[in-house]
Image (cartoon, rainbow, N blue to C red):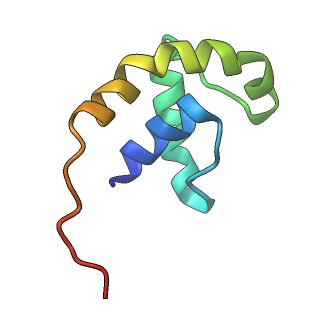
Amino acid sequence: MTKKECAIVMAYTGICMLKGDDLKIFYDYVSELLGGKPIWTHELPALAAGIKEASWNDFLNLCSTATEDTEEAT
C-alpha cells in the first residue's frame, strides 16, 4: 500500500495510518478533495463527514483494485 493509499483510507475511515512528515500527504489529499483550501488539524472533526463523502470513490477504487496476497504465511 502506498502512502497516498494510506491517506485515502485514513480520509474515509478516520483511522490514522500516517505519522510525522507523512501526515502532509494526508493533509494535501484532503485539501485537494475539499477544493484546495488548506486544512488545519482543529478543523478535522467538523469536516470529517464531508471528507468521508468526498473520499468515497477513491476508497471504493482501492477496494476494487485490491489483489490477492500470494505470499504464504510461514
Q: How many marks?
A: 0
Residue 40 makes an appearance in the image: yes
Instruction: Tell me where residue 41 sits by quadrant.
Output: top right
Q: Position of residue 59 (x, y in %)?
A: 40, 29
Residue shown at the point (57%, 49%) measured from the top left = 23
* Left or right placement of residue 11 versus residue 39 in this view: left
- Residue 9 against residue 73 in the figure, above or below: above
Q: Position of residue 32 (x, y in %)?
A: 45, 21
In-front residue for pair 13/67:
67
- Residue 68 against residue 28 in the figure, above or below: below
Residue 37 makes an appearance in the image: no
Residue shown at the point (32%, 35%) measured from the top left = 63
Q: Position of residue 6 (x, y in %)?
A: 45, 47
In-front residue for pair 23/38:
23
Residue shown at the point (55%, 32%) measured from the top left = 11
Which of the image's four quarters has the C terminus?
A: bottom left
* Left or right placement of residue 15 versus residue 66 in this view: right
Which of the image's four quarters has the N terminus?
A: bottom left
Instruction: Tell me where residue 52 sits by quadrant.
Output: top right
- Residue 74 against residue 4 in the figure, above or below: below
